Image (spheres, rainbow, N blue to C red):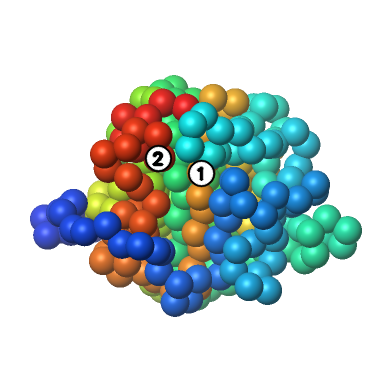
Amino acid sequence: MSIHVHKTGLNKTLGQKSASIVTTNLVGNWDPSTGIETAYWDNQVSSGNNLRRFNSIAKSNSGNCHYWAFDGTDDYLGPASSGYGGSAFQVVLTSAFSLSQWVKWDTGKEHNLFGFNNGLSWVFRVEIGVTTANKLTIDSNPNLGDPIAIDYTFTDDTWHYVTVTYDGSDDFLVYVNGSFVGGGSITEAPWGTADMYIGRYDSNYTDSTIRVGKVHVYNAQLKNSQVRQNFLASHVINNTRVYGATYTA
């Protein structure tokens, strides 16, 4: 495993708010307040596969801020199936991709942002607090290779827009609120096509005090400017009610 040195220029947080997220190569777009069905949430990308609601996971809101809430026992969003939203949403892990999610963090808890299962085993995940308290870890083919540990501490009771990008070879980059915070390489890089889960990895489930907002998935590695655009498009810097940095759900 190798670690990328932080690039000063990538940590800038200036910029004008964009009206919308990047749509080129967008394959997954879910909003807790939109596309709510009895058994699943609609993918807002036309003809895109949906995410099935498992157990008691539900949308909640406080003011204008909508989010998914978990029971901490067995709640998660996962592969749709016949009668439950269609077909499973999958990501080709051997090619470039980008995964983004709004998360309201709770210190000392655990959250499985993204987990992937190829039908035979769990092969890839992005998590906060499972391996290292309040920090993010990327793990490909667990127990075979060294995970990437990101030296960024998530702030308690605060919303973060987390993005992980992959170049299709070995290298990952991580951004929080539109700014680069670290990255690294995994020689046992992800492989195959796998079903995507949110809030679950194997028998590990997200804690009940974690909140999850909008989710964006791309079949390409986004540039820093594009990650920044997506953050600005779903964040209101002077409004604590819409994924604002000081908003507490």
Tell me whether the residue at label 2 lies in contact with that at label 1, contact meaning CB atoms closer than 8 angstroms: yes
Q: Secondary structure at mark 2?
A: loop
Q: Which quadrant would residue 150 be assigned to in this image?
A: top left
Is the residue marked by circle 2 packed among few (<14), some (14-19), or many (20+) residues within 10 Å? many
Return the x and y of residue 220 as percentages of the image width and height.
Answer: 44, 74
Please state which amino acid type lies under the numbered disc 2.
Answer: Tyr
Instruction: Write the residue at 40% across / 34% down.
Output: 241
Q: Amino acid at mark 1?
A: Gly
Characterize the local packing of mark 1: few (<14), some (14-19) or many (20 or more) Cα atoms within 10 angstroms: many
Residue at image x 67%, y 47%?
77
Which residue carries the number 2 mark?
A: 243
Mark 2 and mark 1 lie on one chain; the one further toward the N terminus is 1
Q: Quadrant of residue 86?
A: bottom right
Q: Which mark is residue 213?
A: 1
Q: Quadrant of the N terminus?
A: bottom left
Residue 66 showing in the rendered view:
yes
Q: Residue at x 48, y 76 (%)?
A: 25
In this view, the residue in front, 132 or 69, is 69
Residue at the left extreme? 8
Q: Position of residue 137 (x, y in %)?
A: 42, 44
Does residue 94 appear to the left or right of 146 in the view shown? right
Tell me if residue 120 can be seen: no
Q: Which mark is residue 100?
A: none
SS of the residue under disc 1? strand
Q: CA distance from mark 2 to mark 1?
A: 8 Å
Is 101 on the left or on the right of 158, as rendered?
right
- Residue sitting nearer the eye, 92 or 19: 19
